[in-house]
Image (cartoon, grey):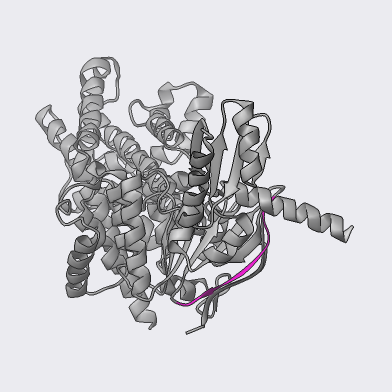
Amino acid sequence: MGDAKWIWALRDGLTMSKRSLMHIFRDVESLLMAIALPVSIMLLFVYVFGGAIQTGTDYVNYVVPGVIITCAGFGSSLISVSVTKDMSGGLFERFRSMPLQPSSLLVGHVVGGYLRNMIATLAVFIVALLIGFRPEAGLLEWLGVLGILTLYMISINWLFVVLGLLTKNVETAGAFTFPMLFLPYLSSAFVPTNTMPAWLDAFSKHQPMTPLIEVLRGLLIGTPIDYNLWLTILWFSGLLVLSYIAATLLFRRRKNE
Amino acid sequence: MNETVISVRNLKKAYRNQQVLDGLSFDVRRGSIFALLGENGAGKTTTVRILSTLIQADDGVAMIAGYDTKTEANHVRRKISLTGQYAAVDELLTGEENLAMMGRLNHLDKELIAKRTAELLETFELTKAARKKVKTYSGGMRRRLDIAISLLAAPEVIFLDEPTTGLDPRSRRKMWDMIKLLANQGVTIFLTTQYLEEADQLADKIAIIAEGKIIKEGTAEELKEVIGEETLELTFADTSGYHEAQNYMSGEVDEEARKISIPIRSVRQLRELLNDLYVKGIEPDAIVIRQPTLDDVFIKMTEHNKVEVLVNG
């Protein structure tokens, strides 16, 4: 019986992921936005600001990881909107009256968001290569990039599921995009942190985005990684576990105030 | 069969400092249609949400098919299906895809899903729209799809929270027919409504809820005895006709509006009444036949309560 429960939970997760994918590919506007935004941000940084920023390498090489995580953050934050929509309509009400695992129902949003982010990331890599991005990564490093990006995206996707569950209306949920777009700017994503005022430098060095970016940059263009790898894994697996637990608890409690 | 399938005892629920349910008790017989009739804010939806395990009561017990909604929620969830006030359908999917998705989430096998989907689309007259996105559906179609979905897994008890609110009269009639059809298949239906007519049309038993309590419970016939029947309202333009008419018929009079309201119990009585007027040459300005409304029930019930208080005091 215990086994059967797990299999059903997995199957339900798949059903819900399929639903999210259908949503993503039927909502062409959002999909195009999710792809166009990162590409434009990258072009903006490389061609407009890039000339003025000294990083010791070609700026396009420096900036690609930052662009990817900024836009993955933006893409993930859209999950809050769809979760809030689901919760405010009748659909999740019915789901909650069925004998289903909350995590199976929510995982669809996480998986869907992950695939949308991966499509956008692929687009960024392709355009970056066209405008002079020259990574030095071998197969192992690319797998590392995939692994780290997956951990990052899945963990913040769960975080945005939680925020979506906490929010009552779709407009508020939309506002969560703001901090996610903003946080990477206060890290080493676009400029080295030692160019910032001392207090900001201290903040930037100790927020999770900086180690994440350093790891990606190290894997892609060979800058030093050292302790940043463990720091990144610690930050984002911690976030993943906490968000996952919070999401499953909130799903049942929601509207029971 | 006289088996009780829903049993509710002394249910209480408060939100912040507002007592929404204040000692609700009732029983629903298996295979019957039970209507919870009340105004907005009377506690109908809260009751449905407690029974369908979405929220928990502060106090009291609600049992469905022998399982406690509080402590055995997952057992209860296997027996019920909920159609809430907001259509539980996915706008971006087609009607068919909605059914298929819910079929999978109900853990039905593939062939059964295909078979049930086709049947339900047919029953609810959605076959033509099956491949269209729900976004393009009318309110009535959405409701029908919603109810079709709730029937996929052949539940024992179906909750319908205001199934016809927001529908046009034609769609409402259609919905009534479908609900009757369901009841004939032996499912227990628990519905909430604010329309007396709807409860009258559908329910085997009606419970009237006000301020979180059942103030009256019975069959439609029993309730009508309390509320009174249809009334004929005669309005007169001039006082002489008004006074003359009063000589021939007894009813409630409204001096100011020059209106006489006479309870109507049969067509024959109505015909005789109008005949009388004609023979006597009395011409009313307006004739209206009025159905009793929920307002009448409340007025009557609150009058009753006042009388009881007086008697008890």
Relative to A45, residue A166 above or below: below
Q: Nearer the viewer, residue B178 or A75?
A: B178
- Residue, x 46% and y 38% (percent of image)? A169
Relative to A70, residue B313 above or below: below
Residue range highlighted in magenta: B19-30
Q: Nearer the viewer, residue A93 or A165?
A: A93
- Residue, x 67% and y 48% (percent of image)? B299
Q: Is residue B8 left or right of residue B48?
A: right
Q: Position of residue A55 (x, y in %)?
A: 29, 25
Viewer can see residue A241: no
Q: Position of residue A164 (x, y in %)?
A: 44, 44
Residue positioned most to the left:
A130
Q: Is residue B18 left or right of residue B158?
A: right
Q: Is residue B296 magenta?
A: no
Q: Position of residue B98 (x, y in %)?
A: 25, 56
Q: Nearer the viewer, residue B20 or A117?
A: B20
Q: Is residue B300 left or right of residue A153?
A: right
Q: Quadrant of residue B80?
A: bottom left
Viewer can see residue B131: yes
